[in-house]
Amino acid sequence: MRRSGSQRWWALGAVNLSVLAVSLDGTVLSVAQPTLSTALGASQSDLVWFSAGYLLVLAAAVLPVGLAGDRFGRRRVLLASLAIFGLGSVLCAYAGSPGVFLAGRLFQGLAGAGITVMALSALVVLFDEQERPRAVGIYQAANFVALPLGPILGGWMLSRFWWGWVFLLNVPVVVLAAVIGFVLIPESRSTQRPGLDPVGTAASASGLAMVIYGLVRAGERGWGSLDALLSMAAGAAVVVGFVWWERRLGRRPTGRPLVNPQLLRPGLFLWGSALAAVAGLAMIGVLFTMPQYFQGVRGTGTLGSGLRLLPLIGGMVVGAGLASRLAPAITTRLAAALGFILLAGGLIVGATTTPTSGTVFTAGWTALVGAGTGLALSVATAAALAGLSAERSGTESAVVQAFNKTSGPLGTAITGSVLVAVYHARLDSVGLPETVAATARRSLYGGTATAQAAGGPGLEQAVRAAFVDGMSAAFLVSAVIAILGACVALAVLPRGRSRRTEAGQPTEEGTVDAVEH
C-alpha cells in the first residue's frame, strides 16, 4: 500500500530522520575517541573495537533484518530498531567501563542494520519506478548532511558539556523519527510469507562478518597481517557458498531462498549495487585523511575540521540532487560514468595538495569530489532499486546495504595502507632523529608534537610533508578506482533511456536486462 500525494514525501522525511540518527552517531564517535580514552580508561584496542564491533554486528545483521521486515512488517522492524538504537545510545552515555560502552555500540550496530535496510526498503514501497530516483537523491543527500554535522556538533558539545550528552542526543532524534514514522510510514510485508532459509541466513551473516573483520584488521595492521588475510579469505569463501546455496535452493520446486537468485546474477541490480559501493570506496579516502590533514598538518581544531568538510558535503548534496534529472536526460550509463569522472578529477587535483595549500583550493577540489560521489552513488543506487518490487524489498534492499557496508572498511583499508606505506617511507628518507621518526610512525599528531619539542622547525615541516605525500598517493589510488568505476559503468549499465514496459516494470531501450519477481 502506498500513501498518496505529499504524505509519501513526508514519510520520506521520517525515513531520513531515522538514518540521520545512525549517521550522526558514527561521525560523533570519531570526534569523541580522545575523551572516551580518558573518561573510560579505554585502550587503543578498545577504541578500535568501539567502531569495529559496531561494523561487525551491522554487517552480520543486514540480511536477517531484511528477512524479518518482509515476514513481520517493515515499519514494525524500523520502529523496533529505533527503540534499540535509543537503548544503545543510553548505554553508551552512562557507560562506566569500556565493556559497557562496547555493549551499547553492539546494540547500536544491530539497530543500525534494521534502520538502514528498512529505510532503503521504504523507498521501494513508497515510490514507483518513476519517482524513486528523486527519492533516492533526497535520501542520499540526508545521509551526506550527517558527515560534517557530527564533527561540528560533537566537537562543540564535547568542549562545553558532559561527554555523555553527545550520545544522549540520539534519543530525542529516534523518538521523533519513531513518532513520525508510526504516523506516516505505511506498514508493509510480503504477501507470501518468505521462508527462513537458516543455511542462507547463517552463511550471509558469518561471511559478511568475517570479511568486515578482515578489512578492519587490514586497515589496523596492514595487508600483510595473517589473521586479516585468513579472515577475508574465509569470509569470501562463505559468501561464494551463500550465492551457490541460494541458486541451488531457488531451483528446487519447494525451495524458499533468502534472496531471489535472479538478483545474484549479472544485471542492473547487481551492477548498480556494486557501482554504488565503488563510489563510496573511492571517496572514503577523503573522509579518512582530510580531518587528519586539517588538524595534524594545518593545525585546525575539531570544529574547524568539520567546517572545512562542508564543501565536500555540499558537492554531494548537489550531485545527488542532479542525479534524478541527468539519468533520464543522458541515460543511467552516462550519468554514472560522469559522476565517476568528476570524482576521479577531483581526487587527481587533490593529490597536488601541499602542507600550505589554501582553503579556497581545498574547498574547490573537495566540492568536485563530493559532486562526483553524490551523482555516481545516487544514480547507481537508483539503478539497483529500479526493478525491485515491494514484495521482497526488505531482503533485496539488504543486499544493496551489504555492498555499501563492505565498501567503507575496504576503502579505508586500501587508502590507509597506501598512506601509511608512503608516509613511513618518506619519514625514513628525510633523516629525522630516531625519537621523532619513531613517534611519527605511530601518529602524525605525536610526531609533530615531538618534532616541535625537539626545537627544529624543519623537523615538524618534514613530518607534515611526509604525511601529505602519503595522502597524495592515497588519492591517486582512489582516482584509479574511480576511473575503473567509470569504465565499468560504461560497459555494463544500459545504453538507452528509461521507459516503461506494458507490465509496468522499468527497462532500458536497447537492452534486455530485467529482474523478474
Image (cartoon, rainbow, N blue to C red):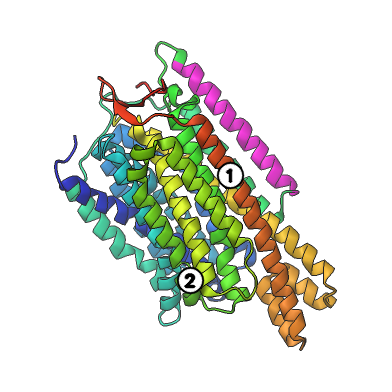
Is residue 472 depicted above or below 388 in this figure? below
Q: Which residue is drawn at the image coordinates 24% and 40% (left, top)? A: 126
Is residue 164 in view? no
Asked whether the beta carbons under mark 2 and mark 1 sit within 8 Å of each other, the answer is no
Residue 121: say if magenta: no
Residue at the extreme top: 253
Quick check: 382 above or below 494? below
Q: Nearer the viewer, residue 392 or 69?
A: 392
Q: Residue at x 73, y 74 (%)?
A: 463
What's the residue type where badge 1 is placed?
Ile
Q: Which mark is drawn over residue 308?
A: 2
Residue 483 has which mark? 1
First in sequence, mark 2 or 1: give its number. Answer: 2
Give above or below for 278 relative to 17: above
Rendered view: 242 above or below 219:
above
Amino acid type indicated by mark 2 = Arg
- Say which of 137 and 251 sits in front: 137
The mark closer to the camera, 2 or 1, is 1
Depth check: give the residue in front, 228 or 88: 228
- Callout 2 environment at 10 Å: few (<14), some (14 to 19), or many (20+)? many
Which stretch did the figure color magenta?
A: 224-250
